[in-house]
Image (cartoon, rainbow, N blue to C red):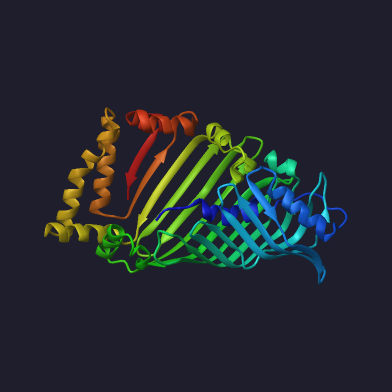
Amino acid sequence: MRTTSLRRLALGVALGALLFAGHPAFAAPDAKQVADALVAASTATGRVKASYESAAEEGGAIAITNYKAVRTDAQTVTIPKLVITGTAERQPGGFTAESIAFDGGKATHGKDTVTWATGLVEEAVIPTAEEVKAESNIRPFSKLGMSTISVSESNLAEPITVSDVSMVLQSASDGSTSAFASQVGGIHFTSEVFKDEPQQKAIIDALGYEKFDINVAAAGAFDAAATEMTLSSLTINTADVGTLTVKAQLSGVSPGGAMTSNKESQTKSDAKLNNLEIRFDNSGVVERALDMHAAMIFGTRADAAAQAKALVPIGLNFLGGDAAFQAKAAKAVGDFLDNPKSITFSAAPTVPVTIEEIGSAAMGRPDTLPALLGADITAN
């Protein structure tokens, strides 16, 4: 299943590009000022056109109707009504808000659509256009919550549903983002999602899966002074499949650069990998895969594991002359297939390595990657 930029648009352009928080508040702006500031912030990078139908006070809040943002690649976000409470002007411009509700929204790109029933951010602010352009290091909000999300894509036969999305951001004394925690709960889809893709559907059916239930959680922190980001944990848990856990530390990354994309190419070239750990804990998929292969070769699960282990060294040939790491990797994979509990890959380079350097090595000299990354792999 492919991941489109549409999802990032739904959770990013509609929120992160528009809502920033944490600065001193002053007088309350009127409805039109707030709506105009929202449009100015949305369009600051030149990649988005934004508009609204009306802005008025409503029951002590500000209501902005039919907000619409269209990116230059035709990705579009529409929100029937933004309801903003507790607004106040701020310096150097823009405004803060106690909350911004964005219920009933939709993001579209061609035939791909994301919809949600409810959405709310707390302690939010719309920044100035200059702050958006400069990728100012400002906490985007304190809390975000969305519910009843549906993702429809042209290559999927049925929608994927998501129960809820939440995010909590902590701020440093200067108002910048210092830590984050997020969850995407209740991701659900059936195997019928892939019925228009026969090869994928055949594999899923052979593995015996009829549905998938997934939960994702992430937590980390920023050190603005050191321009470091620590991903304490990113977990993707799929019932009856397994849990993928990623931990990492990057340098040369600021909260502003990591949370926006105005200078995406520069952020990529500046970012360096300090360390990385990727762990997979099996909860059923390996046994299913071995049983599927055993049926194909008219053998047992042990026969399938033995055949797979024999193929591992061939699969590691791309590492070329690094015989020591090839042997270590082959042993770890073999041990995992014999007793499929967990397998862990780690990287601890002697000095931080740029993401660009890693990509170049992967494309041109993959045999240098283990030494470059200080790589290790273990099982169980």
As drawn, the residue found furthest toward the left would be 298
The correct choice, above or below, for 191 with respect to 7 in the image is below
Residue name at image x 63 percent, y 35 percent: 226
Residue 145 is at least partly visible in this image: yes
Q: Is residue 371 left or right of residue 121?
A: left
Q: Position of residue 61 (x, y in %)?
A: 79, 67
Of 54 and 1, nearer the camera is: 54
Q: Position of residue 315 (x, y in %)?
A: 24, 40
Location of residue 201 by image quarter: bottom left
Residue 137 is at least partly visible in this image: no
As drawn, the residue found furthest toward the right would be 27
Residue name at image x 43 percent, y 32 percent: 358
Of 65 and 239, nearer the camera is: 65
Location of residue 293 by image quarter: bottom left
Of 336 and 158, nearer the camera is: 158
Of 272 and 233, nearer the camera is: 272
Q: Position of residue 81 (x, y in %)?
A: 70, 66
Residue name at image x 33 percent, y 44 percent: 378
Q: Position of residue 113 (x, y in %)?
A: 51, 61
Q: Is residue 2 left or right of residue 70?
A: left
Image quadrant occupied by the N terminus: bottom left
Tell me how many marks there are. Answer: 0
Q: Is residue 167 left or right of residue 327?
A: right
